[in-house]
Amino acid sequence: MKALIDILAKEHRLSKADYLLLLTHHQDEDLSSYLFEKARQTANHLFGHQIYTRGLIEFTNYCKQDCYYCGIRRSNTEAARYRLTLEDILSCTEIGYHLGFRTFVLQGGEDGHFQDDTICDILTAIKSQHPNCAITLSIGEKSRLSYERFFKAGADRYLLRHETANLAHYSQLHPASQSLEQRKQCLYDLKAIGYQVGTGFMVGSPYQTFDTLCEDLLFIQDFKPHMVGIGPFIPHQATPFKDHSAGTLSLTLFLIGLLRLILPNGLIPATTALGTIDPQGREKGILAGANVVMPNLSPVGVRKKYSLYNNKICTGEEAAECWACLNNRLKQIGYSLAVNRGDFSPL
Ligand code: 5AD
Ligand code: FES
């Protein structure tokens, strides 16, 4: 089994059967420590002990989509909806810049209120305020033309998780109006336009199997995204999946390790969801090969409202506390936050 990890570390790809074998042994501690060591060596070699940081600004929780897992889905009438104004957003980036953030992630539901022109105005305003910062958009499925407009207006990166690469599984997670084909088309468009593109999936989402996870890994090794975000599925009480169980720490960490070997120079975050299921989740993610953290820069007053899942961390603190808190946490495992854009760089 360790031989497979050695091959993955050299060739950055495996067959489905090999991934399946590895995944079925993810709880074998001898194997997982071997994987984490290789993954960590790979990350340390390329990034040193510096962790890239992105300031997350959740600017709207209105969403026209109805994904069964998500707390801000359209059908959740219990959600308290909000939108940030341009001024709100610029005050987040201003605070963030002074803390050391050089990348801002504008994340939101698919909110028709924010037309392309409005998004472009936001991008232009942030770029003129801080020309040396990168902007990542994470606002779901749009037309190629819209993606081109955003790119021209200053968006550098785009996050759009594929959620699952298995067709049947995709339709178990989403209503019939959404398709995997459409999702992948968006990812291909984004890459063709020139964005640094991130995809990813939840670990332990309902109806996921080792088999569907292998398909996720095959999709990723072929698509070669610049970033991959994964985190455990965490049930939200006001969704159809409220009674399903959460994804596990051990499987999430194992997958982070595999992803690091598939994409040696990839940008792989230790996600908020990982920090939510385990108090040391993000540190463990970094020790398994992750190299990015994405603390919350949204105004404290709206943080609880951007509730994709239950018990999300960092809902009450000031932005400044998040930077300091994370930096201290990282120091304890021998890492620190980098003050730079943290762009993808080719091998
Ligand atoms: N648990 C964990 N992650 C979730 N996401 C949405 N809902 C949940 C949940 N209940 C993830 C999705 C989405 C990203 C923004 O958050 O993968 O792409
Ligand atoms: Fe937000 Fe620690 S990262 S308080």
Image (cartoon, rainbow, N blue to C red):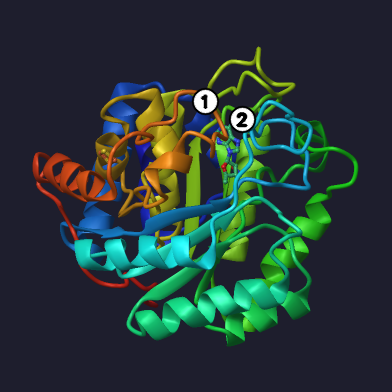
Q: Which quadrant is home to the N terminus?
A: top left
Between the C-alphas of marks 2 and 1, the distance is: 7 Å
Q: Residue 202: which quarter of the image?
A: top right
The residue that appears at 32% across and 39% down in the rendered structure is 285
Which of the pair 31/326 is nearer the observer?
326
Image vertical order of residue 72 relative to residue 112, above or below = above
Residue assigned mark 2: 210
Residue drawn 72% across the image and 47% down it: 63
Q: Nearer the viewer, residue 282 or 83?
A: 83
Which amino acid type is shown beneath numbered disc 2?
A: Phe
Q: Where does the image place residue 283, in percent across and percent down from the top left?
A: 24, 38
Disc 2 to disc 1: CB gap under 8 Å: yes
Q: Earlier in the sequence, mark 2 or mark 1?
A: 1
Say left or right for 28 vs 78. Answer: left
**Residue matched to label 1:** 24
Residue 236 visible, this orientation: yes
